[in-house]
Image (tube, rainbow, N blue to C red):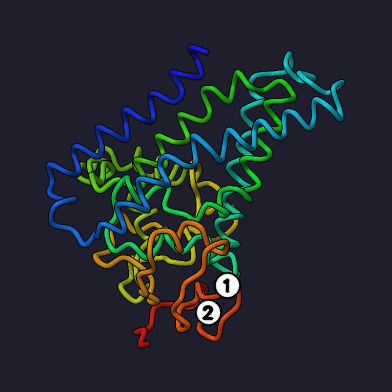
């Protein structure tokens, strides 16, 4: 229990510290966030770790305990490094593909849409996704299976490390600028930016249009590891940061529509969240264009 509590405490502290630093920089006082945006972000921060993830873990572990009790803790004595590799592949790599799929499929995009319509970066952007986006995420289900198989001890360390990296990648503090500023650190930067997600590479993913030469809206999908983008050909590294963020379909839906679609749908017939399929569906694989209603 101590390890589990510490695993939750570390990302929470990092979130708080980064949030304070961003606030001191004026992000949450001079940015474009509305009360609707804050509601989405704060609810997302609560719902994922307190409801969705625990519910999936309880369901999976209960189901496997009933159906395949002989497999419980089957791999508990196997190599620590095999456990890490299992989480990196079945959780982080599968999340890369889940993320990439949400940028190529119009229906999946609707669940990922809240993450991209915000026009400023910051740690609060990290978990802006519809509830169903996380409820269906394969990586969470796979992680529950691995914990059942006896890899829970590694998960206590793996998860907080991953969450901290993802929070840092969304942070408006742009901590990686330090690595780019000094020439002697450039070899370190070269390794870091090709290994994990950084503000430079992930901000590019949130950029409004590739026309600026920096943004890469249909690439840089990595969460913990940027290696997956390197391997699967979706990487773009510029060591710069976009100046405009968002997506061209900027209809600002109420927080409850964005978070609970398709259970709750927009009343606006011109909105892509009016139904699972609409004439106004946004194709996330296309680059930015001016949107007119």
Q: Residue 15, relative to residue 121: is it above or below? A: above
Q: Are marks 2 and 1 in contact (CB under 8 Å)?
A: yes
Q: Judging from the image, what secondary structure is the residue with disc 2 in?
A: loop
Quadrant the C terminus occupies: bottom left
Residue under pointer 2: 281
Rendered location of residue 72, percent (x, y): 79, 21
Q: Position of residue 239 (x, y in %)?
A: 31, 54
Q: Nearer the viewer, residue 252 or 68?
A: 252
Residue 34, by quadrant, is bottom left
- How crowded pointer 2 is (Cα within 10 Å; few <14, some 14-19, many 20+) is rated as some
Label number found at residue 199? none
Quadrant assignment, res 33: bottom left
Q: Nearer the viewer, residue 20 or 226?
A: 20
* Along the viewing direction, whichever of 48 and 109 lies nearer the viewer: 48
Percent coordinates x, y for residue 155 in the rendering: 58, 25
User: Residue 1: horizontal and vertical position, in percent?
Assistant: 53, 13
Tell me which residue sits at (27%, 67%) in the image. Answer: 244
Label 1 SS:
helix
The number of discs equals 2
Q: Residues within 10 Å of mark 1 (few under 14, many from 20)?
A: many
| In this rendering, position of residue 134 left or right of residue 151 | left
Above or below: residue 139 compared with residue 275 = above
Horizontal side, residue 6 vs residue 74: left or right: left
Q: Earlier in the sequence, mark 2 or mark 1?
A: 1
Measure the C-alpha gap from mark 2 to mark 1.
Answer: 7 Å
Q: In the figure, is residue 192 to the left or right of 139?
A: left
Numbered tag placed on residue 106 in the rendering: 1
Please tell me whether residue 136 is drawn above or below residue 256 in the rendered image.
Answer: above
Residue at figure coordinates x 34%, y 67% from the top left: 246
Q: Nearer the viewer, residue 187 or 246?
A: 246
Q: Seen in the image, is 62 located left or right of residue 280?
A: right
């Amino acid at each position: 229990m101590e390890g589990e509590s510490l695993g939750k405490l570390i990302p929470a502290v990092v979130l708080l510290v980064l949030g304070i630093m961003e606030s001191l920089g004026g992000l949450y006082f001079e940015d474009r966030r509305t009360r609707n945006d804050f509601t989405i972000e704060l609810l997302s921060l609560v719902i994922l770790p307190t409801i969705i993830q625990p519910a999936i873990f309880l369901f999976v572990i209960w189901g496997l305990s009933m159906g395949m009790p002989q497999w419980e803790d089957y791999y508990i004595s196997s190599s620590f490094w095999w456990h890490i590799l299992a989480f990196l592949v079945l959780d982080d790599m599968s999340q890369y593909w889940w993320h990439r799929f949400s940028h190529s499929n119009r229906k999946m995009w609707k669940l990922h849409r809240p993450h991209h319509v915000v026009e400023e970066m910051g740690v609060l952007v990290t978990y802006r996704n519809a509830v169903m986006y996380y409820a269906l995420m394969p990586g969470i289900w796979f992680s529950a299976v691995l914990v059942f198989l006896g890899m829970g001890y590694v998960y206590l360390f793996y998860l907080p490390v991953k969450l901290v990296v993802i929070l840092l990648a969304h942070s408006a503090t742009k901590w990686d600028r330090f690595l780019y500023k000094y020439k002697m650190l450039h070899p370190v930067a070269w390794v870091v930016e090709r290994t994990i997600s950084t503000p430079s590479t992930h901000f590019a993913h949130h950029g409004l249009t590739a026309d600026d030469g920096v943004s890469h809206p249909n690439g840089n999908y990595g969460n913990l590891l940027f290696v997956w983008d390197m391997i699967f050909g979706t990487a773009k590294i510029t060591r710069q940061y976009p100046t405009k963020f968002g997506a061209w379909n900027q209809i600002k839906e109420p927080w409850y529509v964005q978070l609970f679609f398709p259970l709750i749908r927009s009343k606006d017939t011109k909105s892509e969240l009016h139904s699972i399929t609409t004439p106004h569906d946004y194709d996330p694989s296309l680059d930015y264009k001016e949107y007119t209603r």
